[in-house]
Image (cartoon, rainbow, N blue to C red):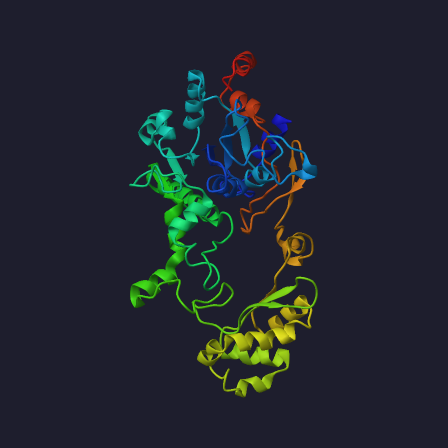
Amino acid sequence: MQASRAAKDQSRTAKEGALSRIRICDFSGQLAGAGATRTLAALGAQVIRIEDRLSDGAWDLFRGIGPYKDERRGHNLGGAFNNHNVEKLGISLNMREPRAKGLLHEIISISDVVTENFSAGVFERWGLSYKELTAIKPDIIYVSNCGFGHTGPYAHFKTWGPIVQAVSGLTFQSGLPDMPPAGWGFSYMDHTGGYLMAIAILMALYHRNKTGEGQYVDISCTDGALTLNGPVLLDYTANGRPSRRAGFPDSNRSQYPPMAPHGIYKCAGDDQWVSIAVRDERDWKAALEVIGRTELSNDARFQTLDDRIRNQDELDRLIEEWTAKCDPVEVMRALQDKGVPAAVVQHPAERLDNDPNNLEWGTFPEVEHGEMGRVRVEGLPIRLSETPGRVRLGAPLLGQDNDFAYKELLGLGDEEFEEFMTEGVI
């Protein structure tokens, strides 16, 4: 099983993955780190995920947690972990053992990138500061990613996705008028941090290809979240207007840029909704044709954008009078046929099984997992004509690729490998 996974991974060609000659020594977990290396693995990089066997891989809090297939539980059966670690190889290494550090140094010496998202100071305590890493491999790229980064006055603060969202200012500007800040859900900042980490790794690789120099990349998820505050920060800087104030729009209305009507509208059926965004006067007239209310273009309440914004409550009521009698797919198609942005508010099951666009793009492919069997995961929403990525292999079982990494890559003999396994080094 282990050899076949590695053989499949090595079968990549330049046609199959833009990063097929890149190897990443990966200590990252959860989503902010694992999400970054997931993307790079799907684009062809050989990502060797390092885990701790003694703790059943507990460095990554997602290993072993739900959702579960058929309610089977165990450290190899976590659905979230599987989703975030597709296409990676997995090995075990006991960092408490001095001999393990020698093996790790060998892995680093044949890698292009070392990634981790531990709290600040963990790698240094292991003797793996950037300076020490460059002594192992001079052109290594070392990437750390955590809530506040590894430098600065907050470097040792502990964070979690919703905490990053709160301190970034995003939570404060979210929610309904006259209600407490509501946040955006659980952990969108991990997604942002993962995307930024993937971009940073690519930029560091590009720099190395040009100059031959590696570098240290420090990433702060909080600062990444700050980049999503643009309009609100600009409004405060330029106009002195705070984000939470009387009249601040609810979460479905658009203030930047101003649009009306713009919202989520109830449709016929149980919990059926459609999203509509009228961007300009052309959209407005086209939407009125679709709903059969062209006379509203001459209504003094709705003649201009400013008029429509002042009267959004009444405008939304009139729009919903029409949508409430209609199927959301019919509303979407009728408006889209006239060039007006509209879409069904889809339920998870609809996204997975009924959306033809998802089927065409392979948005949720099935992968083969060593214990769960065939399971569905997120795909790769990127299409490269000459170097397409792929998502085919499920996440590795704990230590599943030890044979390949230690024997084939590092050249350990069978006897030495078995000794390390028996004595808990790997």
Q: In this view, does 395 lie to the left or right of 29?
A: right
Q: Which of 102 and 425 is in front in this view?
A: 425
- From what the image shows, is residue 111 above or below residue 219? above
Query: Which residue is at 46% across, 47% downward?
Result: 162
Q: Nearer the viewer, residue 119 or 124?
A: 119
Residue 235: % across, % down:
34, 65
Quarter where residue 286 is shown: bottom right
- From what the image shows, is residue 316 above or below residue 121? below
Q: Nearer the viewer, residue 111 or 161?
A: 161
Residue 344: % across, % down:
62, 63
Residue 274: % across, % down:
61, 66
- From what the image shows, is residue 410 above or below residue 41? above
Q: In this view, does 186 lie to the left or right of 372?
A: left
Q: Is residue 189 left or right of residue 268?
A: left
Query: Which residue is at 49% across, 54% downward?
Result: 184
Query: Which residue is at 65% across, 31% downward?
Result: 370
- From what the image shows, is residue 134 above or below residue 210? above
Quarter where residue 372 is shown: top right
Circle count: 0
> For the N terminus, which image quadrant?
top right
Residue 280: % across, % down:
49, 76
